[in-house]
Image (cartoon, rainbow, N blue to C red):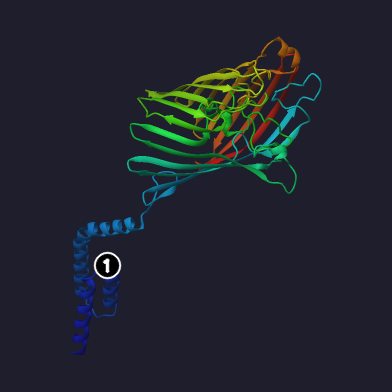
Amino acid sequence: MAKNLLLGGAMAAAMLVMTATPAAAGTTADLLKRLHEKGILTDEEYQALLAQEKTEVAAVAPARQPAMQAAESALDDKRNVRMSDSGIGMEVNGVTIKFSGSVNGFYTHDNGDTPSATTAVTGGVAPVGQSSSAIRNGLLPGYFKIDVTTNQGGWDVGAHFGMYPGINSVNYAAGGSANSPGNPRALQTSGIDFRQTYLTVGRPGMGEFKIGRDIGLFGSEGILNDITLLSVGSTGGNVAPSNTSLGRIGIGYIYTDFQPQITYTSPNWGGFQVSAGLFEPLSSLTGPAETSKSPGFQGKIVYDRKFGDVAARLWLSGITQKHNSVIPGASYTGSGFDTGAKLSYGPLTVTGYYYMGSGLGTTALNLFDSDGAGNKRDSEGFYIQGLATFGKISVGGSYGESSLDYANAADALANPTLVDTNSSYVGQLRYGLTSWVTLIGEYIHTQSEAHNGNKAEGDTIAAGAILFF
């Protein structure tokens, strides 16, 4: 009798557990197994109840699935935090926050000409002096960027911040910036270049407005498509390295710079996209003081499409700015344009770039742009490059040069060692270690020539790694 009562109680308990939620399915099976092992359930009773439990769980689970998904969705909506679709970030209450960044470092060895009267080139970029070694950044410093975007009232809006710290110490001498000359001594600190602070406002079909500090339009395609952007290129000085090397700056293109601006970018019309903006007027780096009466203007047109197996990117950009000198009669207008093409087919990518300017200078915007009396110097430059990728290995090479003319005969007499041409050859080997990390080895030969025949040249080897996330 007692055994029958115990068996009945066990059977009732088993049946009660079996009517619980599917989440308890594993518990029910364990209970039935224990009752069977203790001899309370016969083999026939155990198999019958186990089969019944499996049938009920299979029947109830599909019916509960939508309800469970709805509950989970409601819980997720209540918390309102989701992973972003791409990159490192998340969505919080309809706001997407994304983080991106890069870190790099290279062992770099320069071997240049010995300084002498015949190697002096004003505005030259070739290494001159004793051999030197450094552990340094390449053309890119490190960077950490934060983008906060959302949609409000039908408008896509965003706030963007980009900090660019280097690994090398700088001296900030004479009011220098985060990219001032290097200071390779103990107890120093690296420079943090806050290059990007801008907002964006736009909507589909209308385009986007950008207000703040960001990369310029003129010259941007030149540097962004340069293979030395990920490496070192010409060092620009290796004994006391600063935040960045030169890459191909001044040796194929003028540095676009990060500039205060109000820029509009159109929607993409079948591969065409147009940008135009007002820019902070930049005073000459080598001329007299200016009053900056009017802003600078820059514009760019890009055509980016695929034609079967060929991907093509073509561009044309322009720049102009009035330089209002404090010296009567010394005002002038600097202007220029650049154009280029990037074609990819299979493993091969070929890029060609050209620029021309008047009163625009060389290497940096408005460096050596005039004779200081309002007479403009003309300049031009180009580079050609190829990059072939086979799996994780890429092999690339490029040649480029930048030239600067005298403003007039008086300028030639006053500045005999002014740079005529800076040029360089680059050979590069890459290996994609992971999706984030790329190992890079490079050889660079740089040469600078002055108008009077002076010449300096040097060789550089670099090896290191760059990481993007």
Give above or below for 182 relative to 61: above
Left or right: residue 159 compared with residue 125: left
Q: Is residue 67 left or right of residue 92?
A: left
In the image, residue 74 lies at what x, y percent? 29, 58
Question: In the rendering, at what x and y percent does residue 90 appear?
Answer: 42, 50
Counting the numbered discs, the total is 1
Q: Nearer the viewer, residue 326 or 70?
A: 326
Q: Do we see residue 193 in this rendering? A: yes
Residue 105 lies, with reference to residue 327, above or below; the image says below
Kindly identify the residue that appears in the image at 50 percent across and 30 percent down: 390
Q: Nearer the viewer, residue 6 or 419?
A: 419
Where residue 438 appears, x then y in whole percent? Answer: 55, 38
- Label 1 is placed on what type of residue? Ala
Q: Circle 1 is placed at which residue position?
A: 25
Observer-nearest of 318 and 293: 293
The quarter of the picture where the N terminus appears is bottom left
Residue 354 visible (yes or no):
no
Return the residue found at the far top: 409
The image quarter containing residue 190 is top right
Percent from the top left, x then y, of residue 328? 65, 19
